[in-house]
Image: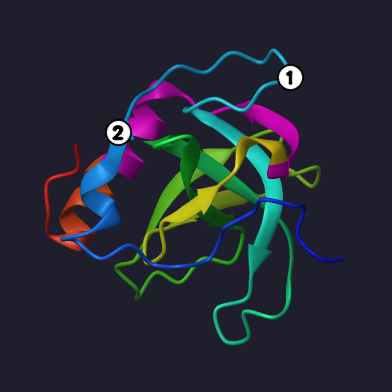
Amino acid sequence: MPPAAGVRAGHRFEPDTELADVTIVYSPMLDGDPDPGEVVWTWVQFEDDPTQGKDRPVVIIGRAGSDLAAVQLTTKPHPERRDEVPVGVGSWDSSGRASYAKLERILTVHPGAVRREGAILERHRFDDVVTALRKFHGIRLA
């Protein structure tokens, strides 16, 4: 299934360009609209082949202009890697598995490309993701 119109997901921000434009905010509200602090489902391009991808859960960390800034979630832990942070278990995973935020790529997603809301990420988990992003990328996010 191809991405929805307007999706721009899967690229990595560079510290001196778009990343400086990300405004981190926690304002979840399960009202049908995607908000920072929520786990939502959207099309995410594969890193090794951007012509392909699939619907994946992402946690929205803020805004990049009129787009959302997000990081992908995975249920496959890699304890030896420093580019993942645990976010716990949530209703976004119907099997009840623990999830991990992948820090390497910050995705930009047009709000209209979000397929569905999944859940609100607890504030302390959200803060853990943002702190880990700052450390991993070695920069101060706006």
Residue 43: percent from left, percent from top: 71, 57
Residue 105: percent from left, percent from top: 41, 64
Scheme of image coloration: rainbow
In the image, what residue occupies the spot 51% across and 66% down? 77
Q: Is mark 1 on a helix, strand or loop?
A: loop
Q: Which amino acid does label 1 sit on?
A: Gly
Q: In this view, does 89 lie to the left or right of 70?
A: right
On residue 32, which mark appears? 1
Q: Is residue 116 in the magenta section?
A: yes
Question: The C terminus lies in which quarter of the figure?
Answer: top left
Which one is nearer the viewer's eye here, 140 or 7?
7
Q: In this view, does 134 lie to the left or right of 91?
A: left
On residue 23, which mark appears? 2
Q: Can residue 100 be seen from the camera position used here?
A: no
Determine crowd level at label 2: few under 14, some 14-19, many 20+ residues with C-alpha closer than 10 A: some
Image quadrant in which you'd find residue 124 = top left
- The residue stretch that appears in magenta: 113-130
Q: Distance between the residues labelled 2 and 1?
A: 21 Å
Question: The N terminus lies in which quarter of the figure?
Answer: bottom right
On residue 40, which mark appears? none
Residue 97: percent from left, percent from top: 67, 49
